[in-house]
Image (tube, rainbow, N blue to C red):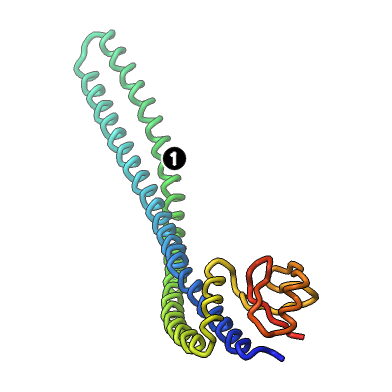
Amino acid sequence: MAPDWLKPALILQEREDRRRRLETQLAQIPAERRRIEAAIEKHRQEEQEAKEAVQALELERARLEREVAEKEDQQTRYKNQQLQVKKNEEYQALTAEIEGVEREIGVLEEAEIQVMLDLDTAREAATAAAARRAEATAEENHRLEVLGQREKNLEVELAAAGTAVTEARAGVPREIVTRFDRIAKTTPLPVVVPLRDHRCTGCHLKVSSGIEFEVLKGDEIVACDNCGRILYSDA
């Protein structure tokens, strides 16, 4: 026959286990929220980097355009000077300068074309990054809303579970509650476990014959001589 304390103790254990599981789930919420917020920030950074790449290329294109304009002005000045010189040597020297500037302009214009191609690619990438951020942010914000509601629900459930544990404790003999609390501080639940096949079902180790005899008698509170859990017979 099962001892009188067993059923109330098992009820207490079940309710305490639920309370702890709810507490663990609630404690995980902040980390999950940080992961979601980090994902949102990652997409924001990707979009910002894509925008900055476009801006950098636009600045580079503007710089090249200025340099081309400056070289063209320089070329014009050399040509005007050619019209004024009278010596052939001076004319040939200016011709060489003009040709050198033309080559420089050619290099700059090739660079400008490449920058414009890169700019088209960068703009497409920026548009795609903005679209990804908008879609991902909407999803992540929805996840945050769901998580916030889950947090509220867990808080309500945890409060109710705490009340249920308090009520259950009132129905368990003080000696059992004291032992239960002491063991549960260092040992994972369950701490009130059946003895089966000569073994504690908490640690799964074989108990001594003396411990088994006392458990089967059911007259006293008996602890496993390996893990310290409270044993009972479910035979």
Residue at 57% across, 81% down: 13
Relative image position of residue 96 (x, y in whole percent): 33, 16
Residue 149: name its quadrant: bottom left
Residue at 61% across, 75% down: 191
In this view, the residue in front, 145 or 16, is 16
Relative image position of residue 20 (x, y in whole percent): 52, 75
Q: How many marks?
A: 1
Residue position marked by numbered label 1 in the rendering: 114
Relative image position of residue 43 (x, y in whole percent): 43, 59
Image side of residue 108 versus residue 84, left or right:
right
Q: Local crowd at mark 1 within 10 Å, few (<14), some, or many (≥20)?
A: few
Relative image position of residue 80 (x, y in whole percent): 22, 23
Q: Residue furthest right?
A: 197
In this view, the residue in front, 169 or 217, is 217
Q: Secondary structure at mark 1?
A: helix
Q: Quadrant of the N terminus?
A: bottom right
Image side of residue 71 versus residue 219, left or right:
left
